[in-house]
């Protein structure tokens, strides 16, 4: 169990945007990381403006968060998945 941050959203709120974020996944192997934790880490970075390497240790590794952020931020029609998820949350 990790510390709660002001930037976190509830699990219930995340369930509304989870299908959107999962749609970017390339189905190669079972996911071993909790998308909720990754999304909360992205929200923390956006709110705090901290550097990637300064991400608190109770979030997933910064490289993992960065790789998901890169996929979710790819431009698409109607905005990136991250933009769409932020509007929904």
Image (cartoon, rainbow, N blue to C red):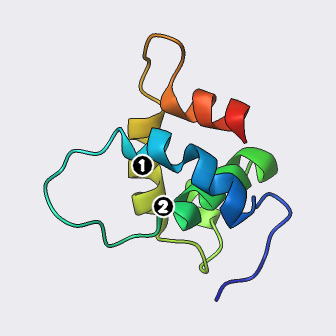
Kind of element beneath mark 1: helix
Residues 77 and 62: in front is: 77
Q: Quadrant of residue 64?
A: bottom left
* CA neighbours of label 1 inside 10 A, class few (<14), some (14 to 19), many (20+): some
- Residue 35 - label: 2
Q: Residue at position x 36%, y 39% from top?
A: 23
Q: Is residue 81 above or below residue 66?
A: above
Q: Label 1, on which residue?
A: 68
Camera-near label (1 vs 2) is 2
Q: Quadrant of the N terminus?
A: bottom right
- Is residue 51 in sight in this rendering? no
- Residue 57 percent location from the top left of the image: 59, 79
Q: CA distance from mark 1 to mark 2?
A: 9 Å
- Residue 11 percent location from the top left of the image: 67, 65
Kind of element beneath mark 2: helix
Residue sitting farthest toward the left: 28
């Amino acid at each position: 169990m990790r510390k709660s941050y002001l930037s976190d959203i509830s699990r219930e709120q995340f369930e509304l945007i989870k299908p959107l974020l999962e749609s970017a996944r390339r189905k190669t192997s079972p996911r071993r990381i909790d998308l909720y934790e990754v999304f909360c880490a992205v929200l923390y970075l956006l709110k705090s403006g901290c550097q990637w390497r300064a991400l608190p240790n109770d979030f997933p590794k910064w490289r993992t968060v960065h790789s998901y952020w890169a996929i979710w931020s790819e431009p698409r029609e109607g905005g990136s998945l991250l933009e769409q998820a932020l509007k929904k949350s």
